[in-house]
Image (tube, helix red, strand yellow):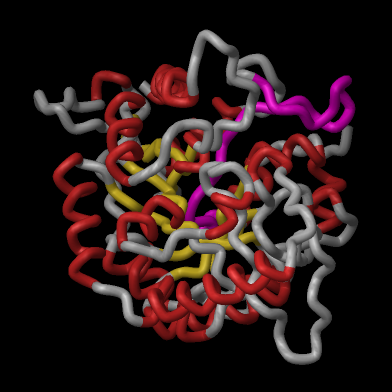
Amino acid sequence: MKNKSEMKNGISRRRFLGTSAAAAALAVIPVAYGCNTQAAAEPAPAASDKPNSKFGGVQIGAITYSWRSMPGGIDNVIKYCKEAGISSIELMSTDLEQYLGIPENPMRSMFGGQRQAPPPPPPPPAGQAAPAQGQRPAGAPRPEGGFQRPQLTEEQQAAVAKYNEDVKNFRINVDMSKVAAAKQLFDDAGIGVHIVKFSPSRWSDEEIDYAFKVAKAMGAKGVSEEIGEEAVNKLGPIAEKHGMYAIFHNHMQFATEGFSYDPFLAVSPAVMMNFDAGHFFGSTGIHPNTIIEKYKDRIFTIHIKDKTGPNTDPANTNQVWGQGEVPIADVLLLLKKNQWPIHVDIELEYEIKPWSNAVKEVKTCVQYARNILI
């Protein structure tokens, strides 16, 4: 297993950008508790039907991808949050856009009505070859459940092309009153939306503007995407223009020799990180706190999960919380001790047994985190 010194050698020590604008933006995230580790200092929540998953000053939330096996829609997302005790989310855009009235995706009917079927990719930029049929474009978000898009007929390809055009028209002419109504539903339920995961780096500039405009109207601080040079270079400056963050999620890139956040962070002070502590540990075996401590001012949120490490059999494999090797308690207690305003989002990826469901499992994860922090 690699050690901390190996990781330090693998990351450039170049000082990352920090600006007063970025600091001011971070300051708007509320920190409700002082740096006090005494459990008695945690005030008892007032009687309410609204969830509260902030423990010891650490905001525990969830990415709504965790409920991908459940029926979708904003009403259901709110129901799941209440049942699991979640008061803050990274919202997958599919449910939001469905509420806003996005045209029906023909891929759903083509492939059996699968929830959140992968959208057809937009045309590639000029001079770039289109990906082969059935191949996921570089930088595109991974399909759920290993979905592989089969070869399309000419008729299906025409339907996809029309859908892409209809979606673009919908996005650039979105009814903002419906966005306000969606936000009100979450506000009434006591649930904050801190990120909307649009993954828009391959969209047109007008659609990217839409993503940031809608995310801001939802009360979010940024839009999330998978990390990559092209995505960061495109979204960073646009996020800065909107006074928002472009927030980038890692998978196993840190296991690649020489990988560093620094070049990405240098693009714009609006570039922030969604640090996936589980993917990081599972692929490197290095303590996640080495990254959190170094980049605390540029990490907006942390995805938390439990996994085995790279030298365990099976390696880098999702586990029920407490049965893997990710030092979850160390991560949470570091945030509690320092009161850093970093969101922690549960990303449920381990196998769910037939007698349970994703909402019950997220609720168990919330309780696991609470027991550590209180």
Left or right, 255 with reference to 298: right
Which residue is painted at 55% across and 50% down in the image?
109
Q: Is 173 situated above or below 90?
A: below
For the C terminus, the image quarter is top left
Q: Is 340 situated above or below 238?
A: above
Which residue is painted at 67% across and 38% down in the image?
145
Q: Is 190 situated above or below 326?
A: below
Expressed as whole percent of the image width and height from the top left, the position of residue 198 reads 49, 62
The residue sitting at the top extreme is: 355
Q: Is residue 308 magenta?
A: yes
Q: Nearer the viewer, residue 117 or 186?
A: 117
Q: Nearer the viewer, residue 12 or 213?
A: 213
Expressed as whole percent of the image width and height from the top left, the position of residue 206 reads 46, 85
Residue 184 visible in rendering:
yes
For the N terminus, the image quarter is top right
Expressed as whole percent of the image width and height from the top left, the position of residue 110 reads 61, 52
The quarter of the picture where residue 231 lies is: bottom right
Q: Is residue 346 magenta?
A: no
Which residue is painted at 20% across and 41% down in the image?
190
Left or right, 228 with reference to 163: right
Expressed as whole percent of the image width and height from the top left, the position of residue 130 reads 79, 76
Left or right, 135 with reference to 96: right
Residue 16 visible in rendering:
no
- The residues colored magenta run 296-319
